[in-house]
Image (cartoon, helix red, strand yellow):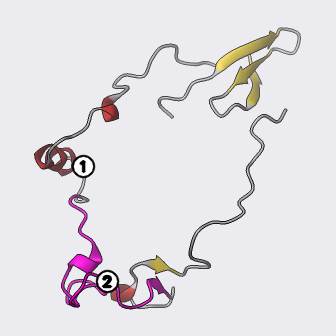
């Protein structure tokens, strides 16, 4: 994809291969006759500048798709969302829902196998040859 890069580590002219170091830290061997773009991707750092006001966010998403503003289900009325209504903004029922639920009820964690924090996740080895 755009914005990806790799560093050439070594060339093996006998085999016709080149070793690359990827951003993840992994190493990859490719054929020496493959092509690559050289230079910097245009528009880099565009997301570093804050939008600062709602109008800029409005125009940003207006040209993309209807995904802004994101209104929470608990902030809506009960006719508009299963989590809506009540005297306080709370869901008031479990947020997990069955895969077999009808279309209007399927909000929240659909067909969740588990919920809660991930505990004891093993870290993957980055630099394996």
Q: Position of residue 107 (x, y in %)?
A: 38, 80
Q: Residues within 10 Å of mark 2 (few under 14, many from 20)?
A: few
Measured along the vertical axis of the image, is residue 58 above or below residue 38? below
Q: Position of residue 125 (x, y in %)?
A: 78, 43
Residue 85 vs residue 67, the one in the foreground: 85
Q: Is residue 102 left or right of residue 87?
A: right
Image quadrant assignment for residue 81: bottom left
Front: mark 2 or 1: 2
Q: How many angstroms separate mark 2 from mark 1 (CA)?
A: 31 Å
Task: Mark yes or no: residue 33 visible.
Answer: no
Which residue in the protein does label 1 denote?
64
Residue beneath the point at 23% across and 91% down: 86
Check residue 90 in the rendering and tell me which mark sits there, or answer none: 2
Measured along the vertical axis of the image, is residue 34 above or below residue 100? above
Tell me if residue 85 is in the magenta stretch. yes
**Residue positioned most to the front:** 88
Q: Which residues are magenta?
A: 68-97
**Residue positioned most to the top:** 13
Q: Is residue 10 left or right of residue 41?
A: right
Residue beneath the point at 20% across and 80% down: 76
Tell me if residue 104 is in the magenta stretch. no
Residue 39 vs residue 56, the one in the foreground: 56
Local SS, label 1 = loop
Residue beneath the point at 74% across and 38% down: 126
Prevailing secondary structure of the magenta residues? loop
Residue beneath the point at 51% across and 85% down: 99
Check residue 121 in the rendering and tell me which mark sits there, or answer none: none
Of the image marks 2 and 1, the number of the one nearer the N terminus: 1
Mark 2 touches mark 1? (CB < 8 Å): no
Image quarter (top left, top right, bottom left or bottom right) of the C terminus: top right
Image quadrant assignment for residue 77: bottom left
């Amino acid at each position: 994809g755009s914005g990806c890069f790799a560093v050439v580590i070594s060339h093996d002219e006998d085999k016709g291969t080149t070793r690359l170091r990827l951003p993840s830290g992994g190493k990859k061997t490719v054929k020496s006759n493959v092509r690559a773009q050289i230079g910097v991707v245009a528009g880099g750092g565009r997301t570093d500048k804050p939008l600062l006001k709602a109008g800029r966010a409005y125009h940003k998403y207006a040209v993309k798709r209807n995904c802004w503003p994101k209104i929470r289900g608990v902030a809506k009325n009960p006719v508009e969302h299963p989590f809506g209504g009540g005297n306080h903004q709370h869901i008031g029922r479990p947020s997990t829902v069955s895969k077999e639920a009808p279309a209007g009820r399927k909000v929240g964690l659909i067909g969740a196998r588990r919920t809660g924090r991930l505990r004891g996740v093993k870290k993957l080895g980055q630099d394996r040859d």
